[in-house]
Image (cartoon, rainbow, N blue to C red):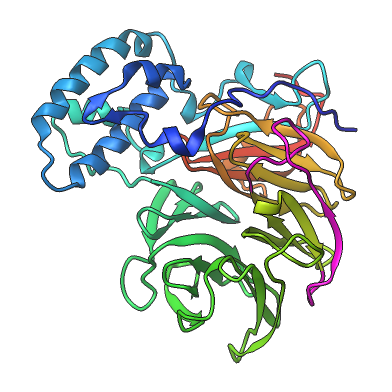
Amino acid sequence: MFFLTGTLVGLSRTSEESGSNILFSSGVVDVAKLFQSGGTCTAWVKYFGQLLRCQMRKKHTTIGPFRSVLGVVLAIIVGCLGCSGDKTTGLKPEQHVFFPSPPEIPRVQFLHNFHSSEDFASKRSGLAEFIAGEEIDKYKTISKPYGIAVSGGKVFVADTTSASIAVIDFAEQSFETFGQTGPGALRKPINVRFGPSGKLYVADTLRNQIVVFDTDGNYITEYGTGKEFKPADVVVTEEELFVLDIASHSIHVYDLQTHQLKRSFGKRGKGFGEFNYPTNMVMDAQEFINVCDSMNLRVQRIDRNGKTSFLFGKPGVTPGHFSRPRGIAVDRDGITYIADARLGIVQLFDPEGKALMYLGGTGTEDGQLYLPAQVVISYDIAEPFRKYIAPNFEPEYLVFVTNQLGPNKVSIFAFGKGPASA
């Protein structure tokens, strides 16, 4: 049994509007706003380093003034750094974070965050390296993630800012990217999904195509001429490819082999089978397509021909409601996960649409989320993730969530059952 418990952290915070100005405002560091936004000092220092690397790539940017300002900021927070550990690199047993919170029986455990190749390299912060005048492009970094797909110990992340797919291999402790050049060059990848054959399908909203790669990043083919649709997401079966078209508020179905359009359904509206800026979709174990109908603040469950079998959701700013729903995932038992960007949480609903619980809460501490975008489930609990699982917590599967703001770009959780010894 699940329990809807806990208190949301920072619900009043506006994410997208304020997030881009957290560090710089007309060239001045807003230190007060930085600390008001929460998070561990070390995590925010890493965030400084990431933004600096982006800032220095811009034209007409000089190093001197930024070093002067950042030297002051470093002096302000160095005391904090001296007495706090880096929570983004793993948790000690006594630090395990669970949802719901005690005394309820835990069903979800937070495991780990990551954001760049730095997670597998030196623990020295990006800001410290910059102040010291060292190479600022040393680490590969996820800038603004959205879609995510998982295969074994590898995680594939669509980075909308760098227009590439980041591949993080936890077993090999490597961080690679692809999709920047050649016929498969991406422009704005939003979502990534694996097909039954193991190919990776990327929905690109500027290229206006579905671009297909193998798991090594080699371009295979594409769907669409660049004029038929503006894809927000994609679902792939053995014979068909479903494209969620955010421009026409509809779904187009293509033959997987011939690339020919077979049928389309949906239009803009509030009725059954109608959508209003649908952003994400996923196929469940019963082969229903679950669509996050974002501007209608609901989820629609439809069959392959667009007939609605069920819908749920209502607007609000408390758990059990939708405020800015985005990513969606469904487990084998029909539990639906919805990432809500405004609330900063991922909510769980039973097959009848009843709210069960949530995980997250806006912030950068362990277990918190910052403008969550997409959520994906993996039943393959690879060995690199098991070291984070608490004693006596029995995981069923992993839950991956992308964060578009803050230092933690991907947060990993485990769904299972307690009691746990933390």
Question: Which quarter of the rendering shows the N terminus?
Answer: top right
Q: Which residue is drawn at 73% across and 30% down?
A: 318
Establish if 394 lies above or below 329.
Answer: above
**Residue 123 appears anywhere in the view:** no
316 is within the stretch colored magenta: yes
Q: In which quarter of the image is residue 60?
A: top left
Q: How many labels does the image show?
A: 0
Left or right of residue 294, residue 126 in this image: left
Q: Position of residue 34 (x, y in %)?
A: 38, 21
Which residue occupies the foreground of this view, 384 or 258?
258
Q: Where is residue 301 in the image (x, y as percent from the top left)?
A: 81, 61
Which residue occupies the foreground of this view, 17 or 365?
17
Q: Residue at x 52, y 67 (%)?
A: 203
Establish if 356 lies above or below 128.
Answer: below
361 is within the stretch colored magenta: no
Establish if 36 lies above or below 317.
Answer: above
Which residue occupies the foreground of this view, 382 or 417?
417
Q: Is the magenta stretch mostly helix, strand or loop?
A: loop
Q: Which residue is drawn at 34% across and 25% down?
A: 45
**Residue 95 appears anywhere in the view:** yes
Span of residues in magenta: 303-325
Q: Where is residue 161 in the image (x, y as percent from the top left)?
A: 37, 53
Q: Where is residue 401 in the image (x, y as percent from the top left)?
A: 59, 43
